[in-house]
Amino acid sequence: MEINIYDKVLLKNGRTAHIVEIWDLGVAYEADIDIGHGEYVTGTIKHNDIVERAFNMNCFLCKGDMESGLTTHTVDLKSCIVIIRDVPAMVCTQCGEVWYNGTVTREVEKIVDAVTATALAEIAVVNYSANVA
C-alpha cells in the first residue's frame, strides 16, 4: 500500500493518524495521531502499524477537506513585516485554515531569521522556493 504525505491512515490500535513527514518510504513516517477528544500527539509510526489508507486529511478546526496548495505566510516582527509567498501547505476548502508540515515550518523559520538579520526595509517580500535549497 502506498502512503503519501498528508494521507489519513488507520492504525492497528484503532486510532487514525495524519502523515506529516515521510522518513523512509515504506518504512517509517512522522504522524499526528488522534488520541481522542480532539487531541493529537506527534509520533513516529512504522509502515506495518498501518492497517489501511483512509481518506484525505481533514481540517482540525472545521473538519472540512484539506487540499495541497500554496499560500502566503506573513509575520509581523514589529520592526519589520515579512511576507513569504508560495509556501507549500494544506489549505482547508471550507474555512481556509492553513497547515504546514514540519519541514516547511522549519524552512519558514529559517527564511524569517535570515530576512530579519538583513532587513533594510519595513516590509520584506520573499518567495519560498527561491529561499529553500
Image (tube, helix red, strand yellow):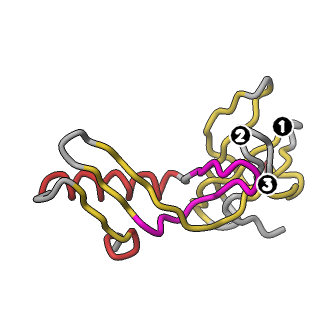
Magenta segment main secondary structure: strand
Residue 33 on image: x %, y %? 71, 38
The CA distance from mark 2 to mark 1 is 16 Å
Q: Is residue 88 magenta?
A: yes
Of the 4 image quadrants, the one containing the C terminus is bottom left
Q: Please state which of residues 111 and 127 is positioned toward the viewer in this rendering.
A: 127
Q: Secondary structure at mark 1?
A: loop
User: Which badge, 1 or 3, comes first in the chain's sequence?
Assistant: 1
Please indicate whether residue 111 sits to the left or right of residue 17 in the image. Answer: left
Q: CA distance from mark 2 to mark 3?
A: 10 Å
Disc number for residue 65: 3
Earlier sequence position, callout 2 versus callout 3? 2
Quarter in which the N terminus is drawn:
bottom right
Q: Residue furthest front?
A: 122
Disc 2 vs disc 1: which is toward the camera? 2
Q: Residue at x 34, y 76 (%)?
A: 130
First along the sequence among labels 2 and 1: 1
Residue beneath disc 1:
15
Residue range in magenta is 85-99
> Which label is found at residue 125?
none
| Mark 1 neighbour density, 10 Å: few (under 14) some (14–19) many (20 or more) | few
2 vs 57, nearest the viewer: 57
Q: Residues within 10 Å of mark 2 (few under 14, many from 20)?
A: some
- What amino acid is found at the position of numbered circle 3 in the picture? Asp
Image position of 35 with respect to 91: above or below: above
Quarter of the image for residue 37 reads top right
